[in-house]
Image (cartoon, rainbow, N blue to C red):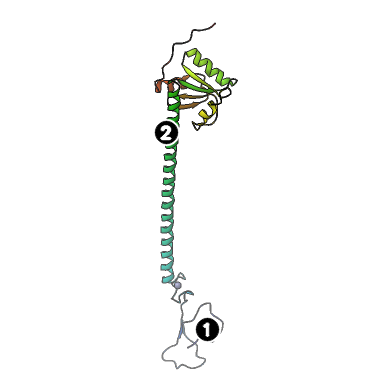
């Protein structure tokens, strides 16, 4: 059996066998007329095809790719599912929070004779505007002054809102800030059946 060292220069591939004409006596120095060779896969020693690939490695690569894409799909699905669960939990929490706030607001409204309750301070301009509006419209309301009544602040805080003035409680609804048009307040009052009083007489 010959190997590549018998052929002089090292070959760029492995020689599998050297075929000599059957009629020629095998003798030293006889030039081989045909050299049948194939390159072998360095992993498993199988014959490489014309693209330098072996069928086992090819199959293995395909299998790996399939496994990887299946794993990626499963991971993606798991991510989507956990995201859906998180979103669901978030909305459940939001719902719980808002119903808790609504219960607190409704209790405050009831404790104040079903009137509009407004948390204010003496000097805030929006509070003055709101006070003037309520008076001008003859809306019955209870003013809770944060700067004058130490029970007002914990009550406002029990609504789980930012401490802002003015903050309105209308029915079970909490509204922060004053819309100078009075429309936001009017809409909330209508929604919660909070009756208007008689308009205060105009003062000149
Ligand atoms: Zn191979």
Q: Residue at 51% x, 16% y: name it.
A: 133
Picture coordinates of residue 73 (x, y %)? 41, 55
* Residue annotated with mark 1: 4
Say above or below: 42 vs 139. Answer: below
Picture coordinates of residue 190 (x, y %)? 40, 20
Q: Residue at 56% x, 84% y: name it.
A: 8
Q: Nearer the viewer, residue 59 or 99?
A: 99
Picture coordinates of residue 179 (x, y %)? 51, 22
Q: Residue at 44% x, 51% y: name it.
A: 79
Q: Quadrant of ligand 1?
A: bottom left
| Crowd tier of the residue under label 1, counting other residues whose Cα lies within 10 Å: few below 14, some 14–19, many 20 or above | some
Q: Residue at 41% x, 71% y: name it.
A: 56
Q: Residue furthest top?
A: 204
Say above or below: 146 vs 18. Answer: above
In the picture, the quarter occupied by the C terminus is top right
Q: CA distance from mark 2 to mark 1?
A: 86 Å
Q: Which mark is residue 199?
A: none
Label 2, ligand 1: CB separation under 8 Å: no
Is 101 left, or right, of 204 in this rendering?
A: left
Q: Identify the mark nearer the N-term, 2 or 1.
A: 1
Say above or below: 123 vs 26. Answer: above
Number of the front mark, 2 or 1:
2
- Determine the secondary structure under disc 1: helix
Q: Which mark is residue 99?
A: 2
């Amino acid at each position: 059996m010959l190997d590549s060292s018998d052929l002089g220069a090292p070959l760029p591939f492995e020689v599998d066998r050297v075929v000599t004409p059957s009629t020629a006596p095998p003798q030293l120095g006889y030039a081989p007329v045909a050299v049948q060779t194939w390159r072998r896969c360095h992993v498993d020693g199988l014959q490489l095809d014309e693209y330098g690939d072996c069928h086992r490695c090819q199959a293995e690569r395909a299998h790996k790719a399939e496994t990887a894409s299946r794993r990626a799909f499963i991971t993606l699905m798991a991510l989507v599912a956990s995201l859906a669960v998180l979103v669901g939990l978030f909305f459940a929490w939001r719902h719980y929070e808002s119903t808790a706030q609504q219960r607190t607001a409704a209790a405050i409204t009831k404790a104040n004779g079903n009137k509009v309750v407004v948390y204010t301070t003496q000097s805030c301009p929006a509070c003055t505007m709101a006070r003037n509006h309520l008076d001008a419209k003859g809306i019955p309301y209870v003013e809770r002054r944060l700067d004058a009544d130490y029970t007002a602040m914990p009550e406002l805080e029990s609504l789980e809102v930012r401490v802002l003035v003015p903050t309105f409680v209308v029915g079970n609804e909490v509204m922060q800030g004053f819309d100078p048009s009075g429309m936001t307040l009017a809409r909330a009052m209508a929604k919660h059946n909070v009756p208007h009083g008689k308009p205060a007489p105009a003062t000149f």
